[in-house]
Image (spheres, rainbow, N blue to C red):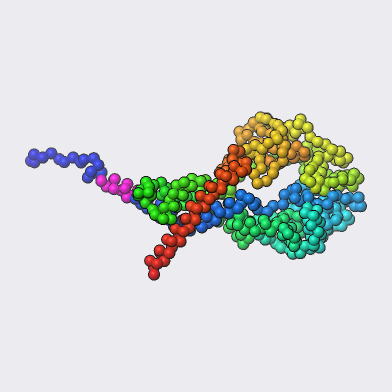
């Protein structure tokens, strides 16, 4: 019998070696995989991300073309119903959700909105008003004469869509007439063939800069954007891959920091890429993530909206008799300076909203068109009736923007009447005190979207929103992220050239 006792395993040595070796191998594999994923995703996406950041600089100063309410009203002629308006030729059996009287090519017309889209009805004893190229040219010529003081004849062509009318809301107006003017600003107007309404206007300045701004930033190229599912999926998954690229880049940057004589193992452009990644990596991550949020992928961040509240405020649907009351009242009592008259339902009664060419509006009773401004008590009553099952936490007139109702690239109506409800989501309704209509809505979902998209993507915070402070913060950040991405493009091209030489 041997005098030696059985050997005992020493912790951390022979007995545990396979386990520790496996962990080390897994760690090496994870690190190497992160490096490779970042490298080859960078080859594929660095150019797109550089395009996103550089075009973002342009978008700080030039927005995508849009015809605002004020711009549209500025081009309308004053209402003249003195020689017409015995009846409106409305479509039978089609529910009408909105209606307004405006002049179209010198004739009074009733523009209406239904579930399937907009339409037009004659008020001048014409059963089916025709909006052809001649009428579109007249509408365009009258619009630029009133809005810009330009007296010129346009060149008109019919189109289905183009670069500036490619997204969803224009489909209800198609086909469109594009009226091009040979003026200094290179004006182009788009007139809906179904309603004779100017639905879009652009200038040469806007078109040029948007090719460097919104079009590449949103991937709004016509052939791609007109296929909504393809465009949405492309932007969503490109953003997801960009998010993964940025996360792996931050990991690699931190993992390599402190190695080498310069606190980095890299040289030349790779060294600059490493340092810009360490400095601007988190900003890049927030911008890519907030860009993904803007797409509301898979229905995330979609709010229910104010639909039920608006139905309660209306009291009942708009009826043909209400529309008739509007245009017969306008014929009997002409309203000087009014270019658009809309009938809306409030608490079950039709009310007229009269707008002038300068954008001002007033509320009037029907059928006598007597001015009917709303008091603070009236607005509070409307706010309470919008959600009768939820008490009001506060209701007040605001003269300054707040965190959820503000203008950044666009203006908002101020003063506004703000109602905050004592529900779990702290729902908010904002009313235009001139008309009593809801102009904005906010609930917990839309507020989350506001912070994750607008807050992170545009640094849209109250302390930074005012210019020139906002520009002073945004421009260096965009320049730094652009440099990071462009260096990534250079490294990707270099890597592909090395691979190509290796194959040869």
Screen quadrant of the C terminus? bottom left
306, 147: nearer the viewer: 147
Whether residue 379 is visible, yes or no, is: yes
Q: Which residues are magenta?
A: 17-27
263, 146: nearer the viewer: 263
Q: Residue at x 70, y 57 (%)?
A: 203
Q: Classify residue 259 as left or right of residue 97.
A: left
Q: Residue at x 72, y 55 (%)?
A: 200
Whether residue 110 is visible, yes or no, is: no
> Residue 257's x, y, as percent?
39, 47
498, 304: nearer the viewer: 498
Quarter of the image for residue 345 reads top right
* SS assignment for the magenta stretch, majority: helix
Screen quadrant of the N terminus? top left
User: Magenta span has 19?
Assistant: yes
> Residue 391's x, y, as percent?
67, 30
Q: Outermost residue, bottom direction?
A: 504
Q: Residue at x 25, y 42 (%)?
A: 12
Q: Residue at x 89, y 55 (%)?
A: 125
> Residue 298's x, y, as percent?
56, 49
């Amino acid at each position: 019998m041997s005098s030696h006792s059985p050997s005992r395993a020493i912790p951390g040595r022979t007995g545990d070696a396979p386990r520790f070796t496996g962990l080390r191998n897994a760690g090496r594999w994870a690190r190497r995989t992160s490096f490779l994923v970042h490298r080859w995703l960078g080859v594929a996406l660095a150019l797109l991300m550089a395009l996103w950041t550089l075009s973002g600089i342009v978008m700080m100063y030039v927005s995508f073309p849009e015809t605002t309410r004020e711009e549209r009203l500025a081009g309308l002629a004053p209402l003249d119903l003195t020689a017409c308006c015995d009846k409106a030729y409305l479509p039978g059996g089609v529910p009408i959700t909105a209606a307004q009287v405006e002049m179209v090519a010198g004739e009074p017309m009733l523009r209406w909105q239904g579930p399937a889209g907009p339409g037009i009805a004659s008020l001048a004893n014409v059963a089916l008003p025709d909006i052809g190229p001649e009428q579109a040219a007249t509408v365009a010529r009258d619009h630029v004469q009133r809005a810009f003081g330009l007296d010129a004849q346009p060149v008109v062509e019919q189109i289905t869509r183009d670069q500036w009318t490619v997204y969803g809301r224009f489909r209800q107006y198609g086909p469109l007439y594009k009226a091009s003017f040979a003026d200094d600003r290179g004006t182009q107007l788009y007139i809906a063939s179904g309603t004779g309404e100017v639905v879009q206007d652009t200038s040469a300045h806007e078109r040029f800069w948007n090719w460097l701004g919104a079009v590449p930033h949103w991937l709004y190229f016509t052939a791609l954007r007109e296929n909504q599912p393809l465009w949405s999926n492309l932007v969503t998954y490109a953003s997801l891959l960009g998010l993964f690229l940025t996360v792996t880049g931050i990991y690699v940057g931190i993992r390599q920091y402190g190695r080498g004589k310069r606190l980095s193992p890299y040289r030349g452009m790779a060294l600059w890429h490493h340092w810009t990644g360490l400095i601007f990596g988190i900003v890049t991550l927030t911008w890519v993530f907030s860009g993904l949020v803007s797409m509301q992928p898979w229905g995330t961040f979609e709010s229910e909206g104010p639909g039920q509240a608006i139905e309660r405020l209306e009291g009942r649907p708009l009826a043909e008799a209400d529309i008739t009351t509007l245009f017969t009242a306008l014929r009997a009592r002409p309203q000087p300076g009014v270019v658009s008259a809309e009938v809306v339902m409030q608490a079950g009664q039709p009310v007229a909203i009269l707008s002038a060419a300068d954008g001002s509006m007033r509320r009037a009773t029907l059928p006598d068109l007597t001015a009917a401004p709303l008091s603070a008590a009236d607005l509070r009553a409307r706010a309470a009736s919008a959600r009768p099952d939820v008490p009001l936490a506060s209701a007040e007139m605001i003269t300054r923007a707040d965190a959820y109702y503000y203008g950044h690239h666009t203006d908002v109506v101020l003063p506004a009447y703000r109602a905050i409800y004592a529900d779990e989501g702290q729902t908010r309704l904002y009313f235009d005190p001139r008309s009593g209509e809801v102009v904005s809505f906010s609930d917990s979902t839309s507020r989350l979207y506001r912070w994750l998209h607008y807050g992170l993507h545009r640094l849209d915070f109250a302390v930074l929103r005012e210019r020139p402070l906002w520009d002073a913060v945004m421009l260096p950040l965009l320049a730094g992220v652009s440099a990071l991405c462009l260096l990534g493009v250079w490294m990707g091209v270099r890597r592909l050239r090395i691979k190509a030489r290796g194959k040869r």
